[in-house]
C-alpha cells in the first residue's frame, strides 16, 4: 500500500492505457519485457533506454487506432509521456542524465504529429466574447419562465468572468462570497485543475445585462429552498470510486526485504469507472445548445469557450500588456512559479482585470453600491422586503445556508436598482413577480419600489479619465497680450536642444471624481 494507489482514477487509467500501448509495442517487436529490463539495467550509459524510447516514439508516430486512423497528436504525446515517466520511475538512475534528451525527443514527436495532422493550429472551441455573453443574458432575462433560467444565466455569467472550467463553479458555496475591506465584491473558489484556492474580485458591470452581481442576486432571490450552493441546479460532483488498497506491510519488513521485480513492473490497476451520470460540462453544453441559436450567437460555443486562452485574448485590453495576468491566477501550475505568484498575482492586479472585464478602465474607481444612502425609515422597510426576498439565505439556523449581511445589502441594492429594466424586458418574469410580491409582503407599494430604484439610479458614476480644462483669462493689459502673441509666434519656430530643456514637464491626465 502506497501513495500511488491514492492517485485520481483518471490519472491511473491514463497511465495504464499508456503502459498497455508500450506492451503492445514490445509484442510487435517480439521482445520480452524481462529482456528490456536487463538491457537497461546493464547499460549504465543509458543508450538502451534511449533506443527503447526512440523506437516507441516511431511506433506512436505511425500507429493506427481502432478506427484505422493514425493516433491523434494528443493521444500519441500522452502515451509517450506516460511511458517515459513509468520507465523513469523504475530506472531512476537514468533520470538526471537522460531527462533533457527524452524531452527533446518528445518535442520532435509533437512537432511531427502537428505537421502530419495538417500543419495548422489545433482545433479549439471558439472563445465567448462579451457581445456573445450579452446576447445570451438578454435572451434569458427576456424569455425567463422558471427559476432555472436565472440559475443558468448566473452560471454563464460567472463562467465568463472567472476564466475557468465549469467544474470550478460546482465548488462555489454561499459562504464563499464576501466584501473585502476596500468594498470590493470577493468570490473564493477552488480551481479543480490546480487544486488551489483563489479569491477573485467582481465589479458591477457598466451594462446591466452582463453584470455579475445582478446575475448572482437574481439566482439567489429565486431559490425555492435553502441550499449551501450558490447555484443550486448544478449536477453534483462525480465522486471518486472508493479506492481498494492492497494489504498493508509493516515498514520493518519493507526495509529488511525490499520487493524484488522480475520484468517491468505493472502500474497500479485503475479503479472501475463510475456510472456515467451527467456532469456539469454536459449541463453547460445543454444550456449553450439551447440558448445560443435562439439568442443569435453564431459561434458554436461549448464549455471550453470560457476557459483561459482564446477567451482571455478575445476580451483583453490594450492597457493590460501582461497577458498571463488574465489567467486570474490559473497560470501558476507548478511550484517553481510561487515567487512570480507572490509578486504579480495580487489583489490589485486582479482588480484591474475585473474592471476591464466589467467595461471600465483599469485605473477607474468603481464604487460598490449598497443601501447606506437611505434614511432610517426606508431602511426598515427595505429590511422587511429583503428578509422575504432572500428567504432561502437569510438568518437561517444552518450557517452554510446564510449569506453575509453586507453582501445581501449590495445584492438587494442591485436588484432594486434594475427592477425597471427587468420589468421592461419581461413584465411577467419570475424575478419581477417575486420582487413585486415581496414588496407587498413588506407592507409597501410598487410606487415605493420605483422610488427606491430611482434613488439608487442617482448614485455617482465611476471616475473617468479627463484632461485638465484649459484656462482662458481675459487680459486687458496690452503687455500681457503682446507676450502671449510672442509665445504663439515662437511656437512655430524649430525647437533647439536648449529650448527643449527649458520646457516644463507636461502634466499627467487628472482623475476627477
Image (cartoon, rainbow, N blue to C red):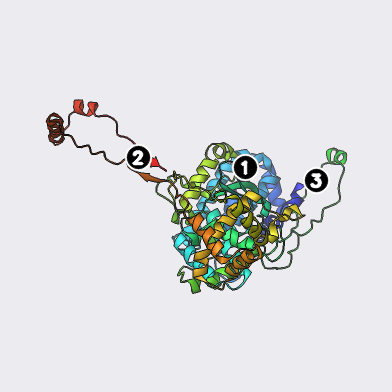
Task: Between residue 510 and residue 2, name the one nearer to us.
Answer: 510
Q: Which of marks 1 and 3 is in front?
A: 3
The numbered mark, 2 or 1, whose residue comes first in the sequence reads 1
**Badge 3: how crowded within 10 Å, few (<14), some, or many (20+)?**
few
Task: Between residue 185 and residue 410, name the one nearer to us.
Answer: 410
Q: Name the residue under label 3.
A: 260
Q: Nearer the viewer, mark 2 or mark 1?
A: 2
Whole-number angstrom distance, CA of label 2 to CA of label 1 = 64 Å
Q: Is residue 22 left or right of residue 302?
A: right
| Res. 509 mark | 2
Q: In this view, does 320 lie to the left or right of 18?
A: left
The quadrant of the image that shows the C terminus is top left
**Badge 2: how crowded within 10 Å, few (<14), some, or many (20+)?**
few
Quadrant hosting residue 273: bottom right
Q: In this view, does 204 lie to the left or right of 188?
A: left
Q: Where does residue 285 sit, x and y in percent of width and height?
A: 58, 68
| Res. 349 mark | none
**Is any atom of residue 345 visible in this view?**
no
Q: Please give the name of the residue rendered at 75% of the width and 57% of the height, measured from the top-left corner.
A: 269
Q: Is residue 334 placed above or below 423 in the rendered structure?
A: above
**Is any atom of residue 131 visible in this view?**
yes
Q: Please give the name of the residue rendered at 22% of the width and 37% of the height, measured from the top-left corner.
A: 473
Whole-number angstrom distance, CA of label 1 to CA of label 3 = 22 Å
Q: Mark 1 points at which residue?
A: 46
Q: What element carries label 2?
A: loop
Q: Is mark 1 on a helix, strand or loop?
A: loop
Q: Where does residue 512 sit, x and y in percent of width and height?
A: 39, 42
Q: Please give the name of the residue rendered at 59% of the width and 73% of the height, measured from the top-left corner.
A: 145
Quadrant hosting residue 147: bottom right
Amino acid at each position: 500500500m502506497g501513495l500511488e494507489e491514492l492517485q485520481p482514477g483518471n490519472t491511473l487509467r491514463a497511465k495504464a492505457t499508456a503502459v498497455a500501448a508500450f506492451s503492445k509495442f514490445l509484442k510487435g517487436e517480439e521482445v520480452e519485457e524481462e529482456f528490456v529490463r536487463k538491457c537497461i539495467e546493464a547499460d549504465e550509459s543509458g543508450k538502451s533506454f534511449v533506443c527503447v524510447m526512440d523506437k516507441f516514439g516511431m511506433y506512436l508516430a505511425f500507429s493506427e487506432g481502432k478506427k484505422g486512423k493514425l493516433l491523434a497528436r494528443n493521444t500519441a504525446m500522452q502515451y509517450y509521456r506516460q511511458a517515459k515517466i513509468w520507465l523513469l520511475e523504475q530506472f531512476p538512475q537514468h533520470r538526471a542524465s537522460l531527462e533533457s534528451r527524452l524531452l527533446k525527443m518528445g518535442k520532435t514527436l509533437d512537432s511531427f504529429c502537428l505537421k502530419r495532422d495538417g500543419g495548422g493550429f489545433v482545433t479549439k472551441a471558439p472563445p465567448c466574447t462579451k457581445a456573445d455573453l450579452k446576447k445570451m443574458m438578454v435572451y434569458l432575462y427576456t424569455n425567463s419562465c422558471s427559476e432555472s433560467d436565472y440559475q443558468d444565466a448566473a452560471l454563464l455569467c460567472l463562467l465568463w468572468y472567472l476564466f475557468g472550467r465549469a467544474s470550478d463553479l460546482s465548488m462555489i458555496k454561499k459562504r464563499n462570497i464576501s466584501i473585502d475591506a476596500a468594498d470590493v465584491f470577493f468570490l473564493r473558489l477552488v480551481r479543480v485543475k490546480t487544486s488551489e484556492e483563489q479569491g477573485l474580485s467582481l465589479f458591477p458591470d457598466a451594462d446591466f445585462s452582463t453584470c455579475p452581481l445582478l446575475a448572482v442576486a437574481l439566482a439567489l432571490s429565486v431559490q425555492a429552498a435553502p441550499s449551501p450552493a450558490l447555484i443550486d441546479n448544478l449536477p453534483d460532483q462525480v465522486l471518486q470510486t472508493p479506492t481498494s488498497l492492497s494489504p498493508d506491510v509493516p515498514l520493518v519488513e519493507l526495509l529488511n526485504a525490499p520487493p524484488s521485480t522480475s520484468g517491468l513492473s505493472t502500474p497500479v490497476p485503475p479503479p472501475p469507472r463510475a456510472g456515467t451520470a451527467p456532469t456539469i460540462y454536459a449541463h453547460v453544453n445543454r444550456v449553450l445548445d439551447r440558448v445560443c441559436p435562439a439568442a443569435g450567437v453564431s459561434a458554436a460555443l461549448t464549455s471550453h469557450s470560457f476557459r483561459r486562452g482564446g477567451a482571455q485574448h478575445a476580451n483583453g485590453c490594450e492597457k493590460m500588456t501582461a497577458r498571463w495576468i488574465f489567467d486570474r491566477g490559473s497560470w501558476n501550475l507548478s511550484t517553481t512559479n510561487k515567487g512570480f505568484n507572490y509578486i504579480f498575482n495580487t489583489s490589485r492586479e486582479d482588480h484591474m482585470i475585473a474592471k476591464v472585464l466589467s467595461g471600465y478602465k483599469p485605473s477607474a474607481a468603481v464604487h460598490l453600491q449598497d443601501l447606506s444612502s437611505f434614511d432610517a425609515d426606508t431602511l426598515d422597510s427595505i429590511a422587511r422586503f429583503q428578509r422575504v426576498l432572500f428567504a432561502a439565505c437569510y438568518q437561517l439556523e444552518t450557517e452554510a445556508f446564510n449569506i453575509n449581511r453586507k453582501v445581501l445589502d449590495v445584492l438587494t441594492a442591485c436588484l432594486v436598482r434594475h427592477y425597471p429594466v427587468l420589468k421592461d424586458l419581461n413584465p411577467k418574469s419570475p424575478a419581477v413577480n417575486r420582487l413585486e410580491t415581496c414588496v407587498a409582503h413588506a407592507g409597501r407599494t410598487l410606487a415605493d419600489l420605483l422610488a427606491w430604484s430611482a434613488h439608487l439610479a442617482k448614485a455617482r458614476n465611476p471616475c473617468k479619465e479627463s484632461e485638465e480644462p484649459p484656462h482662458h483669462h481675459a487680459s486687458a493689459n496690452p503687455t500681457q497680450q503682446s507676450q502671449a502673441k510672442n509665445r504663439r509666434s515662437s511656437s512655430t519656430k524649430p525647437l533647439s536642444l536648449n529650448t527643449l530643456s527649458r520646457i516644463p514637464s507636461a502634466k499627467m491626465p487628472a482623475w476627477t471624481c
